[in-house]
Image: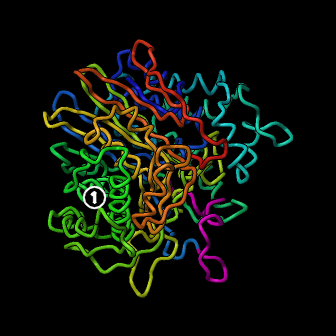
Amino acid sequence: MVSAADPRAAAAGVEILNAGGNATDAAIATMLALNVVEPQSSGMGGGTFFVRHDGTTGKLNTIDGREAAPAAADGKWFYDAQGNPLNHFAAVPGGRSVGVPGQLRVMAMAHAQSGKLPWARLFQPAIRLAREGFAASPRLVNALVSYSRHVDAGTRAIFMDPTGKPWPVGTIIKNPKQADLFDRVARLGPDAFYSGGTASRIVSTVNNAERNPSKMVLSDVTTYRAKARPPLCGTYRGYRICGMGPPSSGGIAVMMILKQLERFDMAKLGRDSPVAWHLFAESSRLAYADRDMYVGDPDFVTVPLTGLLDPKYIWSRSVLISPDKSMQDVKAGTPAGAPPRKRVAPSETPGTTDLVVTDKTGNVVEVTTTIEGPWGSGLSVDGIMLNNELTDFDIVPEKDGYLVANRVAGGKRPRSSMAPTIVYGPDGKVRLAIGAAGGSTIIAQVAKAIIAVVDWKMSAQDAIGLGLIYSPGGTAVAESGTQAEAMVPQLRALGEKVVVGPLGLKANAIERVGGRWVGAADPRSEGVAMGQDGSVTVIERAKMPANRPSE
C-alpha cells in the first residue's frame, strides 16, 4: 500500500510493488514521481528524512538527507552589504538559500541497504510522467498562481504560457529536461547528479543568481553524503513512538508534546473537549520553546536529547501545564547537559510532502521530503527546483552574547520540523506510520494524530482530518472551518490567545487494523492511499480556501 500527496505518485509506488519491489523500492519510485507532479513541494533538488521498519528483523533505521550549507557559509551568511540581517522572505529567493541537495543520496543509501529491484527500474514511472506529460492539478495551479513570483525563466517555460500566466488545470505538462536527468541517474547512478554537468550547473546557477548569489563550490556538491542516524524512540501510554533525531526537531518535539500530556487523562476528556485542546496547546508551546533553544545539527552543536527526555525534566515541564488556565509566559527549560543558549524565533515556510509505503513482507517506510518553501529558491537546474533550505537556519547567529544552536555554519545542516514517525503498539507490532507537510506545523499535526489514534481511538483517516490547534508560541491558531474554530470562545476563557485562520496542513498515514493495512491521506490535499490492487481509500475532501498556506 502507498499513501502519497498525489494519486499519480501513489500509482508509481504501487506499480513498483506489483513488479516485485519492496517498500523501499516503492518509496523511491513514489518520491521520484512526486518530483514530477508536485514540483512545488519536493524534488531531487531538496532533502529527505527516511524511516524504515524491517518486517523480518523488526529493526528500525533512519537516514538523514538534509541539505547542507556550502563550506563558505558562516554566521552572517544572510546579512546584507551593510551588515544587517535579511528578513526571511528577502533571504529566500536566489542562490544564498540553496543547500547542497540530499534526496538522491538518501535514495541510493536506502536502495543499497534494503532495495530489491534494479535501481533503474525505480525511475521508469517518473520518467514516463515527465516525458509523456501529466495533467496540471488544482493544487499545482494554485501554487503557481499564489507562490511562484520568484521562479526563474526555466520554470516559467514549463508551467506557464508565453504571457507568464500559469497553464490552467488539466493542461498536459511535460518536463523533458527532468526526464533526461532521471534517465542519466537511472543508468549511471547518483554520481550523474553529484558530479559532472548537473553538479556544475547547480554551482553556476546559485553563484550567478540575480538575487542573493551564493559562494558554493563544486566540492560542496561532490562530497555530500547522506548519513545513517540513530532513531529517536520513546513511549506514550504503552506505545513506542519512533522517528528522526537531530538535525530534525520533529522527533524530539513530538515526543515531548506527548510525554508532557501523559499525566492527563486525554481519553476521558475526549476529542470534543476544549480542555483537551487547551492542554495540547500548552504542551506544544513548551516543546516548541525547547526545540527552538536547543536543537540543531548534532555534528556541530551539543543537543541535550537525554536531558530533554529525562522523566524528571519532562515532569518539571508538565507541571507548568494547568487544565484551568494558560501559561502567561513560556520559556525554554534547562535540561541536563544543555549548553548556554538563547532562543530566537524560527522562520520556516510551509512546504514539503510526505509518503508512506508498506509491503507484503511487513516492511514499512515513512518518508518526509522537501525543497522547503513553495518552489524553493525559485532557481532550477535540469528541470528540477533547487531548495531554499538554508533559510531554515536562524539568520542571526547569536543573541545577548550566546550562540544560537541553529546558526549557519559551513557544511552544517539546518534544523528541520519534519517528523516521519512509526508507532508500535503494546504488542510490539507496527500500529501506525505517519508524517506530514507544512513547515513547523508538522510537529503539531503528527502529535495530534497520535493522540487521536491512541487516546481517542480514531481511525488514522479521521485523526488526520481533525482540525488543529497550532500553538508554537504566545498565540495559537485554530484551523478555520473545523471543530477547532468552534472551540475558540472556550479556549479564550481558559486564557489562551487564539486567532482563527487557515493552516497549510497535509498528512499521510498507513495503520494496521485487525491485521491488515489501512491507508489514510489528508482530506485537505489531493493525496490518496492506494492498495496493490489499485483500490483507493475513500476520502471526503475538505473544502479549503484556494489561497490557503501552501504545503
The answer to whether 493 appears left or right of 244 in the picture is: right
Label 1 crowd (10 A; few <14 / some 14-19 / many >=20): many
Q: Quadrant of the rendered structure where residue 333 is?
A: bottom left
Q: Magenta stretch: give its range.
A: 79-101
Q: Is residue 210 above or below residue 5?
A: below
Q: Name the quadrant of the C terminus.
A: top right
Seen from the viewer's position, the closer of residues 450 and 1 is 450
Residue found at x 45% / y 67%: 410
**Residue to which mark 1 is pinned:** 256
- Please tell me whether mark 1 sits on a helix, a strand or a loop: helix
For this orientation, the residue located farthest to the bottom is 401
Residue found at x 62% / y 47%: 548
In percent of width and height, residue 3 lies at 42, 29
In percent of width and height, residue 356 lies at 38, 33
For this orientation, the residue located farthest to the right is 163
Q: Quadrant of the rendered structure where residue 110 is?
A: top left
